[in-house]
Image (cartoon, rainbow, N blue to C red):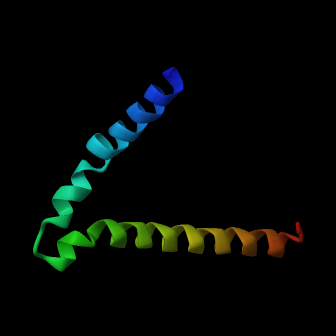
């Protein structure tokens, strides 16, 4: 019974608190505003990828494989 209440509380927290901004974004009419979060994640991913490639080149150049 207690474990069931904990999982329900976690589900309610994610649904009603953390995902609330996404419900308001979904109701917008502008496509660009709706997808800003996705574009931000894509940009962060590209930055991390190029940083990772740069670190690999450094280690390869130093001979540490």
Can you name the residue that lies furthest to the bottom here? 31
Can you name the residue that lies furthest to the top here? 2
- Left or right relative to 8: residue 48: right
Q: Quadrant of residue 29?
A: bottom left
> Considering the image in quadrants, where does the C terminus appear?
bottom right
Residue at (44%, 27%) from the top-left corner?
5
- Decide which of 17, 56 is in the foreground and name it: 17
The x, y position of residue 35, in whole percent, is 27, 72
Residue at (34%, 73%) from the top-left corner?
39
Residue at (89%, 71%) from the top-left corner?
63
Q: Tell me if residue 20 comes above or below residue 25 in the rendering.
A: above
- Decide which of 6, 55 is in the foreground and name it: 6
Q: Quadrant of residue 12?
A: top left
The x, y position of residue 18, in whole percent, is 32, 45
The x, y position of residue 19, in whole percent, is 30, 50
Can you name the residue that lies furthest to the left here? 29
């Amino acid at each position: 019974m207690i474990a069931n209440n904990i999982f329900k509380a976690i589900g309610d927290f994610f649904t009603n608190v953390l995902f609330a901004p996404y419900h308001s974004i979904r109701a917008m009419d502008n496509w660009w505003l709706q997808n800003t979060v996705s574009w931000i994640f894509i940009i962060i991913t590209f930055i991390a990828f190029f940083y990772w490639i740069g670190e690999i080149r450094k280690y390869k150049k130093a001979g540490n494989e």
